[in-house]
Image: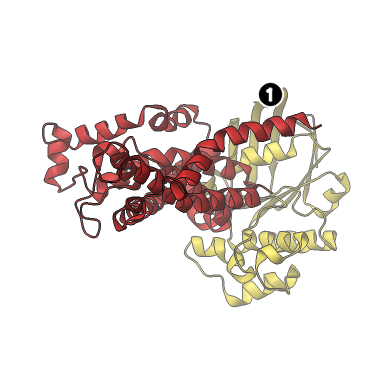
Amino acid sequence: MIEASVRLRLGEFQLNADLRGDGVICLAGKNGSGKTTLMRAMAGFLPFEGFVRVGGADVTSLPTEKRNLVLVTPSSCFPHLGVDSHLIWGAKLKGSRPPDGYLLKVKSELGIDFGGKVSSLSRGMRQRVSLATVLISSPRAILVDEAFLGLHERETFISAYGAMAKAAGVDLVFSSQDEADGALADHLFLMDSGMVTQTR
Amino acid sequence: MNWLRLISIASLLLLLVPIFVLLYYGLGPFRNAAGYSVEVFRSIALTLFSSALAVVVNFVLFTPLAYYLARGNDRVTESLVDIPISVPHPIIGVALLILDSPVTPTGRFLLALHINFYNTMLGLVTALVIMSAPIYVKSMQPYFESKDPSPEELAMGLGASKMRTLFSIVLPDSLDGLTSASLVSMSRALSEFGSISIIAFYVLQYPFYGVSPASVTIYEFFSGNMAGGLNAAVTASAAMILVAIPITLAGHFVRRRTSR
């Protein structure tokens, strides 16, 4: 279960949003509706009034690195690493090594059938590697901000990613400009002008 | 007629006139054997060695500061960084002398730990670090600012501390910026005179025992304390310029490549 109540002001823009749900959550809204701001606040990159709870634990006052709540954007990757080192970077940081079987399963489900240095990969391949890296690190929740955008067979990928996240007990929040993406999620939150206007 | 280009080139020539004058007279009419003697080349070697050491210290100690300034919003710290290069440089030499003087408590403490700045390699490098680190920080800070923070945010989300993120994620992808900033700060260290002429007029340690930094040697020729006089000072200056120019140009070249 992920719960957030975020109030903040950035210049003229005001965010006043509440979000609550578990499993796969789609945050839909037009450009500038506040999706990115909400996710950045939840991940600990913006100060705000309110709270963020993940699995019942209040992480509001924790720094980003202690929240176990990972934000992924289209350019979130470590270009100097090789694909395999990248995939286990987060898990290794926590002192664990994912079982080979799980690693192979994630790679196969997410279509990571390539190797080499991340800097030499296409944008879509990099996004797949980053998203897989986060999943393998077993966080409490994953915040995917536009990082599904432009992926080949995007809907299949989101479904597979969401299923694996749920199987691992990880809550997934992803942003989209297309309300129809709500069909891929357990919950849909519509955002407009910094406010959550509708929920399912 | 492109007046902007014309005025720009004219103003640049104005800046370069002293360099051309020294190269012309130093390698031509004023050429003096004392100006390219073994003593001069040992001075230049000491300057290069101590400046390179200062760059290593800059990298280790001041890269985190540059990153902190780039990713934080600490305007006070940012303005404090400029202080060492905004005061007359001999003041830094005097400050180091006082800091390490047997008549001050700090000096007694440092000397008890066998830390001696006066006419030592440690003093020379310390002065060069203080005079070149602000240039290093001011060169690295905009480089870090120009980098997309997404990889760093991913690393922190995965549990990496800011320091771990800097060393594991940011620096391996910043070799061009680090090289450029290091070369630019080394150029600054090579040109230092004010502070080192007070704290390390010469170095009393192997392998540079009795050797003065190049800028001090040139001053010694000029002031008549070393045989050769003005002609040797001009010749040694030309030799030093020939050594320094490639480093300055390399720093500039890497920076241009970085900013593309």
When the figure is inspected, residue B214 is found, relative to residue B8, above or below; the finding is below
Identify the residue shown where x is 44% and y is 31%: B82
Q: In x, y percent, where is residue A181?
A: 84, 50
- The answer to which of B104 and A158 lies nearer the viewer is B104
Secondary structure beneath disc 1?
A: loop
Letter of the chain that mark 1 sits on in the rendering:
A
The picture quadrant where one finds residue A198 is: top right
Q: Determine whether, in the image, residue B36 is placed left or right of residue A9.
A: left
Identify the residue shown where x is 29% and y is 54%: B39
Can you name the residue that lies furthest to the front here? B29
When the figure is inspected, residue B157 is found, relative to residue B78, above or below; the finding is below
Circle 1 residue: A11
Q: So how many labels did they put on this image? A: 1
Q: In x, y percent, where is residue A98?
A: 56, 70
Please rate how many residues cluster around mark 1, counting C-alpha atoms within 10 Å: few if below 14, some from 14 to 19, many from 20: few
What is the drawing colour of chain A? yellow
Q: Say whether residue A193 is visible.
A: yes
Q: Determine whether, in the image, residue A153 is placed left or right of residue A57.
A: right
Q: Determine whether, in the image, residue B252 is placed left or right of residue B83.
A: right
Q: In x, y percent, where is residue B64?
A: 45, 45
Task: Specify the amino acid type for callout 1.
Answer: Gly
Identify the residue shown where x is 43% and y is 33%: B81
The picture quadrant where one finds residue A160 is: bottom right
Chain shown in red: B
